Image (tube, rainbow, N blue to C red):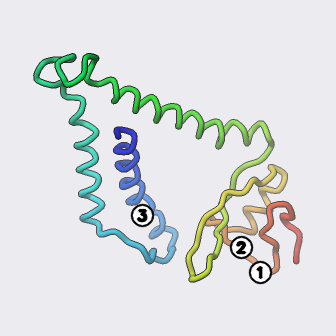
Amino acid sequence: MYPATAFDFLLAIGLLFTRYHRKRLNFPKSGYRAWDIAVCFAILSNLYLLVAPWYPPLGGATGGDVSFWYGTYLVVGIAIIGVCGVYYYVWIKILPKMGGYEFRQTILKMEGGATAHKLVKVPNDHLESWDAEHDAAGRLRHRGVRANSAELGKPV
């Protein structure tokens, strides 16, 4: 439960950052929006749920409803988050350096107008042409150029 609360807290904060950056990059508003007051309430309620469990029960450190330290599940939850952070760092930073590529984002258009984002591996020797042909969101700047990462820079 504690990692889920931490995730929900960071998700709500990330939503505010995403809104700010979308506005700064002149992206259109999303069709799915949460009220600002609801996002702020989510941040405050999850912050409470992250802080409150650290206060010991009335019986002291081992006085709760279990025979071991009351904060054990908190530490295990934080360790799980830490392991996930290490995994992410290895996948996004270390493996691309060893493999000679970097990740770039592309936008996929779905039926009904929905969009999704996909990470593609771009070899280091194609990064300059990729960045020249795509904007920050991964959309093609020029028509007539293939978006397939295996054929970067080859005109249609």
**Which mark is drawn over residue 6?**
none
What residue is shown at x 24% (from left), y 65% (from top)?
37
Q: Residue at x 88, y 77 (%)?
A: 156
Q: Classify 10 Å Cα crowding around label 2: few (below 14), some (14-19), many (20 and above).
A: some
Q: Nearer the viewer, residue 9 or 21?
A: 9
Residue 125 x, y percent position in the rendering? 84, 52
Amino acid of disc 2 = Leu
- Do the residues under discs 1 and 3 have CB atoms within 8 angstroms? no
Taking 68 as reference, is 133 left or right? right
Q: CA distance from mark 2 to mark 3?
A: 23 Å
Query: Residue beneath label 2, please?
Result: 140
Secondary structure beneath dot 2 equals loop
Q: Are marks 1 and 2 in contact (CB under 8 Å)?
A: yes
**Residue picked out by circle 3:** 20
Find numbered disc 3 in the image and state the secondary structure of the residue it sits on: helix
Image side of residue 134 versus residue 152, left or right: left
Is 52 rendered above or below residue 103?
A: above
Q: Secondary structure at mark 1?
A: loop
